[in-house]
Amino acid sequence: MNSSNRVHQAESRQAPSVRHDQAQYDPTTQTTGASQAGDAPRPPRTGKELLDATRPFAVESAWESWWSVCSTLAILVSVLVIAAIAPWWPLRLVASVLGGLVFLRTFILYHDFMHHALLRRSHAARPLFFVLGSLMLSPPRYWRHSHNFHHGHVGKPLEVDGHPEEVLLTSDVGSFPLMTTEKWRTTTWWQRVQYRVTRHPLTLLAAYATVFLYSLTILPLIRSPRRYWDGALSVLAHGATLAAIWVFAGFGTLFFAFLLPFAIAAAIGAYLFYAQHNYEGMHVLDPNEWTFYRGATESSSYMRLNAIMDWFTGNIGYHHIHHINSLIPFYRLREVMRAIPELQTAKMTSLRPSEIRSCLRLNLWDPEKECLVPYRAAQPAA
């Protein structure tokens, strides 16, 4: 059965408790489970109780949202202009890298808007983010479909005719594919090649072309042009921007002011998405045990970053909280972490080189060990 059929079957079974691992959050910022000193600690909240605890934070400040958008775009334009006109190439390179990081933050703002966490009632924001999404090769129609599917199925095996598939998720529905060790042992060599390519570090590094241009824009357009027509607009808008810069400013300007910054943002963004659901301690649940809340807390990580990277990534490191309640604006996620003790115990990862290597080498799910393992742990059957 092809992946499109699996998607439509799985969509009809979306769910709107939680296993807590050893606390990894900074204890100096933790709150206690008691409301006042001397009160008996309350039992940990799970499931819908945990969602309800986050609801007060799913309220945005229109002023803060607009300030975040306008200031980010102003900084983005400024650094890209420096990358375009600076007379010294090392300065252009520094501005280009900085532009890539600000591009990444811009994408997170788009991501939040698509979740209705940011400027949800603003008529002016709609055309603005439609243009931004198109220029960033993230056309809104397919982005909304694939990302909502991801949120509704993270950590859950797909089922066909009531039986779990060994391929837990597919790359064309908002996630990277994940096979069980059993499936890996019995699959064909060509399927293994495709699987390795999709999850390969070079695929993440080249995410500009592999993830954003191909997977998010061109492939949906080819498969369903009437449904994902905005993919054509995205390709045209992005291509026209590249052509205009090249014709009127030259390839050097195009490289430093657009190609390199966007490539950096795409690569970092793809890795963040990959690592936040592919880390040591990530748990794939049995379909009969899976709930939306358990998927958010057991299959989504807390990526601990410094304050500077939190700004560039729009606090996306608080990913388990985002999966619990995607209506929370990015600038309130840290506040939620500090206020709700149950969310301070998420499995943690980071951007340390050792943890990046660890995430990249975990490629298969072992149902018996209940953990992610490298390819060598499941050599194909002879």
Image (cartoon, rainbow, N blue to C red):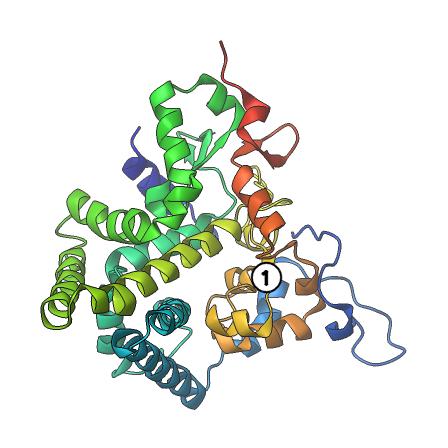
Which amino acid type corresponds to the residue marked 1 in the rendered image? Lys
Which quadrant does the N terminus fall into?
Answer: top left
> Foreground residue, 123 or 127?
127
Which secondary structure lies at badge 1? helix
Q: What residue sits right under mark 1 in the picture?
A: 48
Instruction: Tell me if residue 104 comes above or below residue 71 in the rendering.
Output: above
> Foreground residue, 230 or 348?
348
> Foreground residue, 266 or 69?
266
Rendering coords of residue 75 (x, y %): 37, 82
Mark 1, residues whose alpha carbon is within 10 Å: few (<14), some, or many (≥20)? some
Rendering coords of residue 203 (x, y %): 37, 43
* Relative side of 206 to 351, left or right: left
Classify residue 369 by image quadrant. top right
- List the single residue furthest toward the left: 247
Instruction: Tell me if residue 242 comes above or below residue 9 in the rendering.
Output: below
Residue 151 appearing in the image? yes
Rendering coords of residue 155 (x, y %): 52, 45
* Relative side of 40 to 345, left or right: right
